[in-house]
Amino acid sequence: MPSTESRPLVVVLGASGFLGAAITAQLAGLAVRLRLVSRTRKLPLPATWSAEVHLADLTEPAAVREAVKGADAIIHLAAHLSDDRSWRAPGSESERLGTGLLDTVVRAVRGRPPVVVFASTVQAAAPPGRALNDYVREKIAAEELLTEATRAGTVRGIALRPATIYGRTPLTGETGRGVVAVMARKAFAGEPITMWHDGTVVRDLVHVSDAARAFVAALDAPEALGGGRWLVGTGRPEPLGEVFRTLADLVAARTGRPPVPVVTVPPPEWADATDFGDVHIDPSPFTAAAGWQPRVPLTEGLSGVVNALAR
């Protein structure tokens, strides 16, 4: 076992978020030094864990440079999430936490190129010609910046494109702000689960613990993954109507009430094409390169969300 000082330093940008907390839990058991960076909130770390905790505004270049100083690896999860729609919304802060933050990281690097794993989105793999919202375009721009920095030898960049992430994060017990948690909360409130389509639209749902293991696996395979853009998911698309009906049944089993109905409603004005298209991905290239594969079955993951919300 290497001494503490000789262990590689892994910096997690956005460590207090839904995925960040799950990644932190995975990294805590490894022979690394951890620096956890978030904007306003510290993770509730067990007393036996050792980690540097930085509160920093990552839209400020000086704060970014301090956060990544001396890093052997950087996991970039930071995102602008101030409201329920913020992942869709354009704006200077979204850009500063995407291409702006990556550009600052690249410029701050000194010495041996660190591994940089960037959290992109499965929507970045959309076929040519499909309309993309500002969020997706910003992710793609950040991917391109990372690819260029990798070609230049400044960093060893890896872009991961996770499918729809859901579940319960073990470290905090949180269930996130994604569609699964939102609809489960509606069911607990006795409200109908709503869809903007007929329920046949499919999504690949990957559990947050599996997604976290994918990011950690990427750190160990920079030679195989470096410079690439990799899809992460189960490879098993699920019709959302069936997912929501399963949620309704699981909540009913906890509350003793009849399952809430799953209904179709008109989409809001701010919905876009990505809300109505199917998502099919093939994670086998990432599996082959990184040795990763998902472990959490969908029903088990949905039950975990329901149990967490029930408590």
Image (cartoon, rainbow, N blue to C red):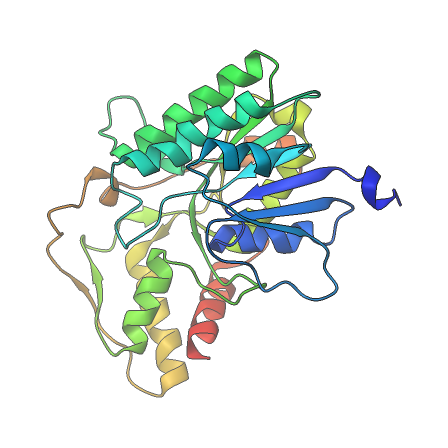
Determine the image quadrant of residue 113: top right
As drawn, which residue projects farthest toward the top? 152
Residue 163 visible (yes or no): yes
Q: Is residue 118 above or below residue 174?
A: above
* Most foreground residue, 292 or 220: 220
Image-based side of 159 in relation to 223, left or right = left
Q: Can residue 294 be seen in this snapshot?
A: no
Q: Position of residue 258 (x, y in %)?
A: 28, 83
Identify the residue at the far front of this view.
62
Q: What percent of the width, then of the height, locates residue 233?
A: 49, 43
Q: Is residue 17 left or right of residue 248?
A: right
- Which residue is painted at 46% across and 79% down in the image? 311
Q: Nearer the viewer, residue 54 or 139?
A: 54
- In the visual, does 7 lie left or right of 98? right
Position of residue 89 measured from the top left corner of the image (x, y, whole percent): 25, 41
Residue lying at the far bottom in this picture: please name it: 256
